[in-house]
Image: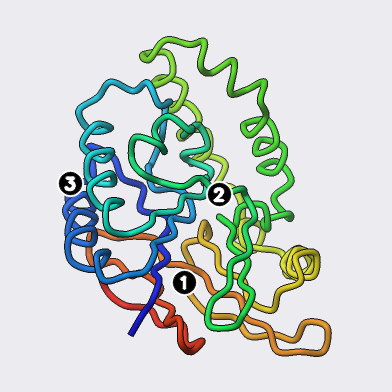
């Protein structure tokens, strides 16, 4: 049956060989049968820029390019790979999406997000997000040398990890009011996002009608999952990689 796949939060890096192996298997075995694949952010644990000369960056680019020759790939920035630009996307065969994108699936309008913009209770994070996504920060980062960017990425990850340890799970999860506001803004009853690492389907009522929020799974060494949606009937299904 014709279907599309959604993934997010793989956090690939040279230090995650098991995840790299899973991703390569996914590209070879599951992706060719899909009508399209949507990557909703944090494909990488950190992305320092499209001019990254590492063998790791070149390898992932090659894998994606090969996959794109038979299956359309769509990419939405996450909080770890917001520096990924049009150069890498073009060479990898990926289509860049805005931070909020509505698509049609089996007669339903579905909003796609990475999901971090929904965590509005985390005020400090939202301030940092605004800074990191600004054109000024991008320009400043690209003026740094590769070693400087690598060090800066390490510092940001360390600061993020320390801040996370001090925050409650409630603060770092999505805010339901923010969820409903953005769904109303885009005129949808269905939302797919990642970021929170809490895969689930949440049912609620929006404007007097049933609505759903589908949270994608983060990938793990012990087993990872993708969200599959058939194009002939709206029945989201989590399937193992």
Q: Nearer the viewer, residue 98 or 42?
A: 98
Which percent across, then down, holds residue 234? 51, 86
Q: Image point 38% across, 15% down: which residue?
A: 146
Which percent across, then down, holds residue 40? 48, 55
Q: Decide: few, some or many residues near mark 1? Use Cα within 10 Å; few <14, some 14-19, many ≥20.
A: some
Q: Image point 45% across, 53% down: which residue?
A: 74
Q: CA distance from mark 1 to mark 3?
A: 23 Å
Query: Foreground mark, 2 or 3?
Result: 2
Where 38 falls versus 82 (above or below)?
A: below
So how many labels did they put on this image? Answer: 3
Q: CA distance from mark 2 to mark 3?
A: 28 Å
- Under circle 1, the secondary element is loop
Determine which residue is flagged by label 2.
97
Which percent across, then down, holds residue 76? 52, 49
Are the two marked residues, 1 and 2, in contact with CB atoms closer than 8 angstroms? no
* Quadrant that contains the N terminus: bottom left
Q: Is residue 103 left or right of residue 224?
A: right
Are the two marked residues, 2 and 3, in contact with CB atoms closer than 8 angstroms? no
Determine which residue is flagged by label 3.
17
Q: Image point 37% across, 21% down: which residue?
A: 51
Determine which residue is flagged by label 1.
199
Q: Specify which label sits upstream in the sequence, 1 or 2.
A: 2
When asked about the image quadrant of residue 139, the answer is top right
Query: Foreground mark, 1 or 2?
Result: 2
- Under circle 3, the secondary element is helix
* Quadrant that contains the C terminus: bottom left
- Under circle 2, the secondary element is loop
């Amino acid at each position: 049956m014709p279907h599309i796949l959604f993934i997010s939060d793989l956090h690939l890096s040279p230090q995650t060989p098991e995840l790299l192996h899973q991703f390569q298997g996914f590209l070879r075995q599951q992706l060719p049968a899909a009508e399209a694949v949507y990557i909703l952010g944090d494909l990488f644990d950190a992305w320092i820029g499209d001019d990254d000369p590492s063998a790791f960056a070149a390898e992932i680019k090659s894998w994606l390019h090969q996959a794109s020759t038979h299956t359309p790939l769509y990419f939405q920035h996450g909080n770890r790979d917001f520096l990924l630009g049009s150069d890498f996307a073009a060479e990898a065969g990926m289509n860049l999406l805005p931070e909020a994108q509505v698509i049609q699936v089996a007669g339903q309008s579905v909003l796609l997000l990475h999901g971090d913009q929904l965590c509005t209770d985390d005020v400090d994070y939202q301030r940092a997000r605004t800074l990191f996504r600004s054109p000024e920060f991008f320009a400043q980062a690209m003026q740094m040398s590769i070693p400087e960017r690598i060090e800066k990425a390490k510092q940001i990850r360390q600061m993020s990890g320390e801040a996370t340890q001090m925050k409650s799970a409630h603060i770092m999860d999505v805010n339901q009011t923010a969820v409903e506001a953005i769904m109303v803004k885009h005129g949808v009853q269905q939302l797919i996002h990642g970021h929170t690492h809490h895969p689930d389907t949440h049912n609620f009522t929006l404007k007097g009608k049933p609505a759903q929020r589908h949270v994608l799974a983060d990938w793990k060494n012990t087993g990872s999952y993708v969200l599959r949606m058939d194009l002939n009937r709206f029945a989201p299904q989590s399937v193992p990689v």
